[in-house]
Amino acid sequence: MLNSNTSCIKCVDGINTCVYCAGKLVRNGFSRSRKQRYKCKDCNKTIVENYTYNACFSNVNKQIVLLLTEGLGIRSIARILQISVSTLLKRIIAISNRVRLPVMTQESSYEIDELCTFVKCKSKRIWIVYAFERETKNIVGFNVGSRTNLTLKKVVDKVLNTNPYAVDTDRLKNYRSLIPQCIHKTVRFGTNNIERANLTLRTHLKRLNRKSICFSKSEVVLNAVLKIYFGSFA
Ligand SMILES: [Zn+2]
């Protein structure tokens, strides 16, 4: 997956010019792993000729997103990209902070559904609640949390803020107190789109696979992974 050349992408052009500003480089001691370090005379940034760890490659973040949404777990991604698990987790959270969910349109129709999964141990069951906009087919909002009205409310309120003309849900009683009766629908086949999205989600994200030993160890990372997933398909 990674570049076959061993040198870092930052200094592919040779070590005479700075990759940031094309300034002149001078030797500047050694890195902790005893590698020659260079310093730019103009911008003062330092560069090492051959970095020890693969996480410095500029295309790593792109590959993380690609592998994450293709049904691979954290440890398999770390093995394939030859980076450490802790670096990978940090990167996932950093990438997710830059992801923006699609903008919601006013007066549209939505489907809301909840997906059951667990974090830390199989006995701690939680909900992933999310909203699907019918016209754009985008996931426009989601929330992860305990199986309570509070978790549902965050997504429902976000949808209600856009004055929707219809909100379809399954027959879960909790929705009745949250969505005004005039726009709330629980008809058969009304949530077909989002039920299909559930299946896709369960296939694409390793941590949501059924009948496997894989599951999320942390709610923060689960949140980050979902945000990247929903954001990258927008
Ligand atoms: Zn420079």
Image: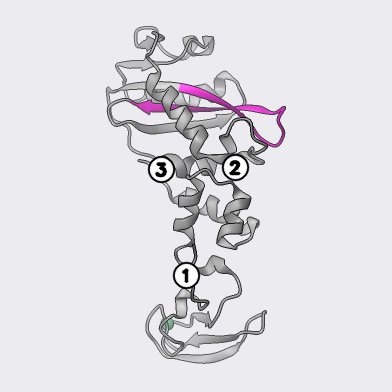
Q: CA distance from mark 2 to mark 3?
A: 16 Å
Q: Which residue is mark 2?
A: 220
As rendered, which of 192 and 142 lies closer to the eye? 192
**Amino acid at the residue labelled 1:** Asn
Q: CA distance from mark 3 to mark 1?
A: 27 Å
The quarter of the image that holds ligand 1 is bottom left
Q: Is residue 224 visible?
A: yes
Q: Main secondary structure of the magenta part?
A: strand
Query: Quick one: quadrant of the C terminus?
Result: top left
Residue 191 at x, y = what percent? 40, 18
Q: CA distance from mark 2 to mark 1?
A: 31 Å
Of discs 3 and 1, which sits in the foreground? 1
Tell me the element at label 1. Answer: loop
As rendered, which of 73 and 146 lies closer to the eye? 73
Of discs 2 and 1, which sits in the foreground? 1
Q: Residue at x 53, y 25 (%)?
A: 115
What is the span of residues highlighted in magenta in the rendered image?
Answer: 113-133
**Amino acid at the residue labelled 2:** Val
Residue 141 at x, y = what percent? 43, 32
Bin the neighbour count of mark 3 within 10 Å (Cα to Cα): few under 14, some 14-19, many 20 and up: some
Q: Which residue is mark 1?
A: 3
Drawn side of residue 50 relative to residue 18, left or right? right
Q: Which residue is mark 3?
A: 231
**Amino acid at the residue labelled 3:** Gly
Dot 2 or dot 3: first in sequence order is 2
